[in-house]
Image: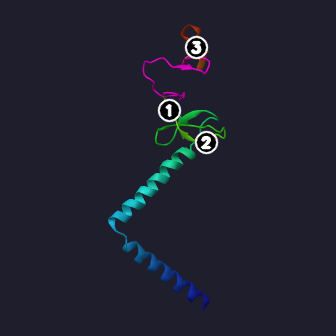
Amino acid sequence: MKKRRTKAMTFMLAAAGALGVSACTHADWEGIAMGLNMVAAETAVTLTQVPPYGCGFNANRDPVCDDTGDGFADRYADPAWDYIPGYSYGNAPLIRVNDYGEVFRYYGNCDCWRREPSLDTYPK
């Protein structure tokens, strides 16, 4: 007797679910799809493993970075500021200026930043 109630209950739940799904309009399905797309975009960032405090690429080939050091991406990278290994920067030299006006240039042959005193721009 108990199995019959379980089967009957399962059938009623399935029927209610089918009835609910059939009542959805095209706009409802578009909304559901958009919501699922947003969740997929978020997990593409947060579930991507990158070097701690480093940058890399997620499954969609978008550059992402880890700011907390846990090895998982926390945000999308900004190629104008973040160094992303394997990212094409074009012919422009990679230069960064710190808060003291000291300039550092990136050298790809050693994968390092070196001080470039000739380009220093001290604050006024």
How many neighbours does mark 1 have within 10 angstroms: few (below 14), some (14-19), or many (20 or more)?
A: few
Q: Earlier in the sequence, mark 2 or mark 3?
A: 2
- Magenta residues, as a range? 80-107
Query: Where is residue 103 shown, x and y percent of the image?
Result: 57, 15
How many neighbours does mark 3 have within 10 angstroms: few (below 14), some (14-19), or many (20 or more)?
A: few
Residue linked to disc 1: 78
Query: Where is residue 50 shown, x and y percent of the image?
Result: 59, 37
> Where residue 72 is drawn, which disc sits there?
2
Alpha carbon separation for disc pair 2 and 3: 36 Å
Q: Nearer the viewer, mark 1 or mark 3?
A: 3
Q: How does the figure colour the protein chain or chains?
A: rainbow
Q: Amino acid at mark 2?
A: Phe
Q: Residue at x 49, y 43 (%)?
A: 59
Above or below, comparing residue 8 to residue 111 in the picture: below
Secondary structure state at the residue bearing disc 3: loop
Query: Where is residue 61 shown, x and y percent of the image?
Result: 47, 38
Is 88 magenta? The answer is yes
Residue linked to disc 3: 122
Q: Earlier in the sequence, mark 1 or mark 3?
A: 1
Q: Nearer the viewer, mark 2 or mark 3?
A: 3
User: What secondary structure prevails in the magenta region?
Assistant: loop
